[in-house]
Amino acid sequence: MAVPIPPKDAEILTTACDYCAIACGYKGYRWPVGKTGGLRASENALGIDLGNDVRQDLWLSPSMHSVIELDSKKYNLLVVPDHLSKVVNREGNHSVRGRGLAQKFAPRMNKKKGRLTQPLLRVKGKFEPISWDLAIEIFASVSGHVVDEFGPAAWAQKRFSYQFFENTYALSKIAWQSIQSPAYADHDNPGKFTSTPGLKDAGIDSFSACYEDYYLAETLFFSGSDPYETKTTLFTDWVMKGVRERGNRLIFVNPRKTSGVAFGERNGGLHLDIIPGTDAVLHMALARIILEEGWQDTDFLNSFITVPLDHKFDRLQADNKKPWKWKNSFPEFKADGVDDYREWLFAQKESELSEASKITGLKAEKIRKAAEMLAKPKKDGSRVKSSFFFEKGLYWSNNYLGTASLASLALVCGAGNRPGQMLSRLGGHQRGNMTVSHFPRLIQPREFEGYHRKCVDLDRWLVGGNLRFAWVVGTNWISSMAGANSLERQMRHQTVEHPSQIKSIKTAIEDLKERTDKGGLVLVEQNLYLTEIIGEQLADLVLPAAGWGECDYTRANSERRIRFYSKLAEPPGEALPDWKIVSLIAKKMGFSGYDWKDSNDIFEEAALASRRSIFNFDSLVHDARLKNQKAHDVLKSFGTEGIQAPIQYLENKLVGTPRLHNPELQIYQKDKRSRSSRYPYTKAISGFLGKGGKANLVKSPWNYFSDFYQAIAPEGDELWVLNGRINELWQSGFDDLYQREEILKRYPVNFLEMHPEDAKKRGIRSGDLIRVSSNKVFTQKDGYAGYSAEENRFEELQKKGLIEKESDSLELVAIVNNDDSIRPGVTFLFYLYPNSFANRIVSRVPDPISGNYRFKLATGRVEKLGETPFQKEFERLSFASRIPEPE
């Protein structure tokens, strides 16, 4: 299939990929259908020669092209990686996901799952299209009734945190500032809790590193993720080049061997195929070996570790039990310097090498080898530059202890604030969360005023029957949360199974108000597509949203690089940007401050709030105002390179921040236009977030997790059932499975990877239809749990009768890994495949310290149900190994 070539006068628009956290830079070329450019650089807008030479700078794939309508005229749209890029995806590198961005605008391949194009109302059990005016009137009237009659805590917002600054800011403004509801949670969180609390207590920001650090580090410790699978360009463009050009070595901590792991092993690296959930023990054992051998970075520890700590203020608040004064800090786990940490660590039985080997399932010599690779001095006496990178396989297994123990290990090795010596998340989604400054903590219900809580646990609040209105934006609340079966059961009970249903369009408002008065729930979905449960089966009102490429937006990637995402095409039908929908609703409800003319207005308004985050772009907005320009236009001038936050001024120029906590950098406070220097996250430019700009060593006592771990661990013929992402398929497949035929053919159903020994015992072959059943789906009941982490431990909750045990199952297709690429006793499935999502068998019992879930840990029994067509149709579902070395 020939791809049209953009003519010299084609419109060129900058954007970035919509998928993983790396956000490769892309350019969109738009020109009228019927025109075409030439093969020579002087004849096309690309500025390159497009001959038959396979070594050319840019290869145009049919998946990079689509035809769109704009102002009732047809245009060609070509979305290609920026081959001139010198950052992120240098020279136009890209992933298999990004190369199909233009297909977002192609005619809908899956007609059943086409984009939402107009508001829908469920009348007598079936959707009917309605006008935006009526949709907004229904939303505003029922919302106002719920808030007036039941209070703001009965009105909930469950929404994406990964989207764009303009949308997330608008959504937080109406929920937190106007309605003032504390019933709120991000898409991957039960409440407003910190995702990586151990790092927060250590004084380290989760996204402190830059991509150059992946190249400069001599030893890279990857925990809970293979970045080749999920952040491809980061791996191929930075990690692999570091291995091949500098001899860097990779350590992977992962029960599965995937392509990146195989590459690391073949190039002098190490694979620690750990028993799921035991990472904290591994970290403690590594730190103990390093301290016993005297390999710690003493100069770094003396310079950057806080001692003694000042626990007085924190403990006073804990004693007074005033969560609104609590700053999500856990002082009892912070060590009073190196000596206190050493004394504590050496007293932990789990840190002993023999015990750690038994718990983690790793040979003692492999653990010791990892310690040597991380910290043993070189022959010339110089230190190894080690960096530590992690993702959800770690912090969604054992949230606080996993992140706290990794932070302490990294600090002991001298990592955290220097080139090639950093500690950082790899990232899942891009960083698009920007909220108004203050969350309404004081309004939260009394039963959720507890230890470290900033917000209600929205899932428990729902299951307890406390909600009357829920607005679900850009996520499927059920499939994205643990213990999904009980969540669905409660939602169904309060919505479609409730006696009060919408009888007609004319009576909709009164019918829905009646439902709320009688204990029911009104459910609104706002999304690109109908989600498989909430949208298709339960929602009363559906609002069609505009997505990537359908409005001017801004967002940051995992090295805090803020870029401008241009509008490439019109949204389908009557779909509107989320911020515009918020504006219509807020004004209908009588709230002021929502008269935004365009998305730039919101971006500029959000600048004040950004000063309280690591994505501080206040200086950019202020600079634009001084120049009498739009802030979006100033950001657009940085092209696909963008600028790294926090953004400051230096000699009347905007400057970005490559990496955080770097003592060699300074905060520029002399320029009067830099208005943000007093905020702690801006101070993170040159120092850690602990007292005096230093970091804290943090303790990670295993007993805060071991009770839950023992309850969930496999027994008899049970296996670990892990879940996560894979390279080709993103998230819930919302675009992939609905738009890209080759992906649907590759993954027509969800799968379960198994070790050959486990499959043989059960008589299972690749392609068999199987069932995974679990009777260990623990859920924490609604109600007061306790003020302290000790009171919130699993065994204490059991004693209080606050833990229930349920059963659930999934039907999948087996993939038997005959290459031993998965640990015996461990299985793996894609986590959010529609109608086959992993969270049906994941326990909904929060971490007792942080309040977050353990999404990655489940156990179950696997049984064969029969054969499937896929055993004979290998072209549809491939059973090939996933571990060939990437080229």
Image (cartoon, rainbow, N blue to C red):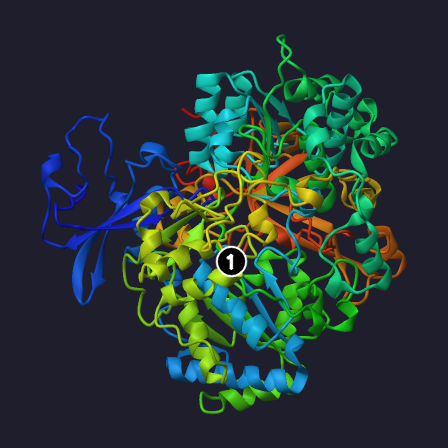
x%, y% of residue 360? 74, 30
Residue 223 picture quarter: top right
x%, y% of residue 224? 61, 37
Res 369 visible: yes
Res 38 visible: no
Residue to which mark 1 is pinned: 610
* Front position in the image: 324 or 399: 324
Residue located 47% across and 63% down the image: 606
Identify the image quadrant of the C terminus: top left
x%, y% of residue 143? 56, 81
- The answer to whether 176 is drawn above or below residue 149 in the figure is above
Q: Is residue 820 left or right of residue 709?
A: left
* Front position in the image: 344 or 223: 344
Q: Is residue 154 left or right of residue 812?
A: right
Secondary element at image label 1: helix
Identify the image quadrant of the N terminus: top left
Q: Amino acid at mark 1?
A: Ser
x%, y% of residue 365? 73, 16
Residue 440 picture quarter: bottom right
Residue located 38% across and 56% down the image: 623
